[in-house]
Amino acid sequence: MSLAGAQEIIGDGMPTPLAGPGDVTRGRAIIIDRQKGFCLLCHSGPFPEQRFMGNLAPDLAGAGSRYNAAQLRLRIAHSARLAPDTIMPSYFATEGLTRVARPYVGKPILDGQQIEDVVAFLLTLKEAP
């Protein structure tokens, strides 16, 4: 199980950013893009313009109140580290994975900057559903 760039994991978080500061607007765009982040296939959230959000995973509303940046980063980068049986993709892990779509074999789904953008946006979601 390796992460691109071999990031340090401490407890339930990944404290070191994977790139520069995240951009909230880009992070929101990644989350609602069904071809890039795929988030809304399983999650719902405060996205009134989106239809057909998933209900297999926690609502993203309030994520910024439930988790800090390090915790969100690990959950996005390598969710299986916290829950080995999760169906959530490990967006930054590149090895030791199962059920990997052919275009993503050996490379992350999101790069470090994109993950930081998503983390930045999720930190703004303070209100619970």
Image (cartoon, rainbow, N blue to C red):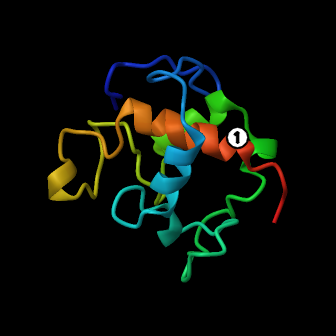
Q: Position of residue 48 (x, y in %)?
A: 66, 74
Farthest-out residue, front: 25
Q: Position of residue 4 (x, y in %)?
A: 31, 27
Type of residue at label 1? Answer: Leu
- Residues 74 and 121: in front is 121
Residue name at image x 49 percent, y 16 percent:
8
Q: Position of residue 13 (x, y in %)?
A: 62, 28
Residue name at image x 72 percent, y 49 percent:
63
Residue 119 visible in image: yes
99 displayed left or right of 61: left
- Residues 103 and 50: in front is 50
Up-down: is 71 above or below 98? above
Quarter occupied by the N terminus: top left
17 displayed left or right of 95: right
Farthest-out residue, bottom: 52
Residue name at image x 56 percent, y 76 percent:
50
Up-down: is 44 above or below 87? below
Q: Which residue is mark 1?
A: 123
Residue 81 visible in image: no
